[in-house]
Amino acid sequence: MDDQSRYDAGMKTRRAVLGEAYVDKATQGVTDFNRDFQAFITRTAWNDIWNRPGLDRRTRSVIVLSVSSALGAWGEFRIHVRGALNNGLTRDEIAELLIQVGVYAGVPAANHAYKEAAAVFAEIDADKPA
């Protein structure tokens, strides 16, 4: 695959996982300064990694939530809570994942991750039509 094909495939995956609206908003923030980096992560993370055949998207979401919470990468964590729901994880499964994070990455990380996930759930619930 050439770079453009990898980018196109990565963007398709990124949109499927994170949602059209999120990606549209994020791509509006591309500047001359970050353009090369954005293209790089779209090709490598969203295509070369997310489209590998060895794991399904649901499993990849579990990994991303676990690692981002362990690292305290809260912006990335919040983005991927939505992605995990799009990939079929339930809120209960995310809560279960965070219990495991507490054991392996520390209670402070898991405690904060619960707060971040709850805030994302509240945003999602607020966006639902009444």
Image (cartoon, helix red, strand yellow):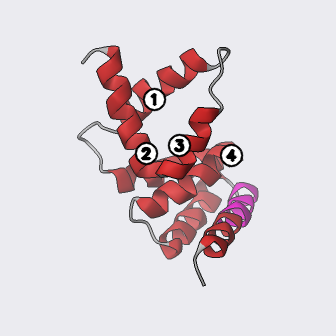
Is 114 included in the stretch rendered in magenta?
Answer: yes
Q: Nearer the viewer, mark 1 or mark 2?
A: 2
Q: Which residues are magenta?
A: 107-117
Dominant secondary structure (helix, strand or loop) of the stretch shown in magenta: helix
Q: Are marks 3 and 2 in contact (CB under 8 Å)?
A: yes
User: Which amino acid, mark 3?
Assistant: Val
Tag of residue 42: 1
Q: Nearer the viewer, mark 3 or mark 4?
A: 3
Q: Quadrant of residue 121?
A: bottom right
Tag of residue 15: 2
Where is 60 relative to 11, above or below?
A: below
Pick the residue in front: 61 or 105.
Answer: 61
Position of the C terminus, as image quadrant, is bottom right
Report, in whole angstroms, how far the alpha carbon at label 3 lies from the one at label 2. 6 Å
Dot 1 or dot 2: first in sequence order is 2
User: In the image, residue 106 lies at what x, y percent?
Assistant: 69, 55
User: Is the residue marked by circle 2 packed among few (<14), some (14-19), or many (20+) residues within 10 Å?
Assistant: some
Dot 3 or dot 1: first in sequence order is 3
User: Which amino acid, mark 4?
Assistant: Gly
Q: Which residue is mark 3?
A: 23
